[in-house]
Amino acid sequence: MGIRMRLTAVETVHDEGSWLFTVRDRHGELEEILLVPCEDGVEAWVNRCTHESQRFDTGNGAAIREGRIICPKHGSLFDSCTGYCDNGDAAETTLPSIDVTVDGEAVYLTDDDVTYLHDGGIDEDDEDDGPASTSHLSF
């Protein structure tokens, strides 16, 4: 295991419902990572649906209901602790995970395949932050 990078407090993730940060992967690509609450601490998932790469958190937190991350485009629900989806367009897929460790009250990035860059998402001034116009969700 390489260097541990302190990300945030477990309490922050649980209080805010999710927490977003940006990494560079082993291929040099930027990737957003989403920390979400779990019974035993937190889990970290790549911040995009497996169906059409729709971002869960566009800067205002991810929509999570009853321990499931909601895709804002088609409504697929991913278990926040396992990353598995059993419904909708993303059914039978699992979110890519990133290794984090909880030590005391702190969450640390411990994945050797990524390098921490900063809190928050990738600056994407040229893209719309909301779901594509084909969104089928209504609240």
Image (cartoon, grey):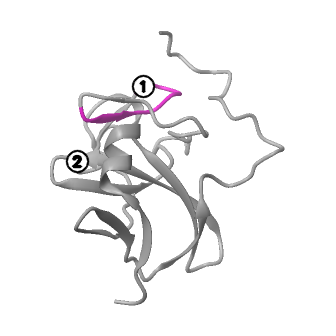
Residue placed under numbered mark 1 in the picture: 75
Q: Do residues under tags 2 and 1 come within 8 Å of each other at their CB atoms?
A: no
Q: Residue 48: x, y in percent?
A: 51, 47
Q: Which residue is mark 2?
A: 38
For residue 57, say whether it is visible: yes
State the residue at coordinates (57%, 35%). 60
- Report the label total: 2
- Residue 128 placement: quadrant: top right
Q: Which residues are magenta?
A: 67-75
**Disc 1 residue type?**
Gly
Element assignment for label 1:
loop
Task: Pick out the residue farthest to the right.
Answer: 126
Q: Earlier in the sequence, mark 2 or mark 1?
A: 2
Question: Is residue 17 visible to the viewer in this orientation of the structure?
Answer: no
Q: Main secondary structure of the magenta part?
A: loop
Comparing 108 with 74, the one in front is 108
Q: In the drawing, does residue 117 fall left or right of residue 70?
A: right
Element type at mark 2: strand
The x, y position of residue 77, in whole percent, is 33, 32
Q: Is residue 73 left or right of residue 34?
A: right
Tell me if 138 is positioned left or right of 75 in this view: right
Residue 52 position in % (x across, y down): 54, 41
Q: Nearer the viewer, residue 81 or 116?
A: 116
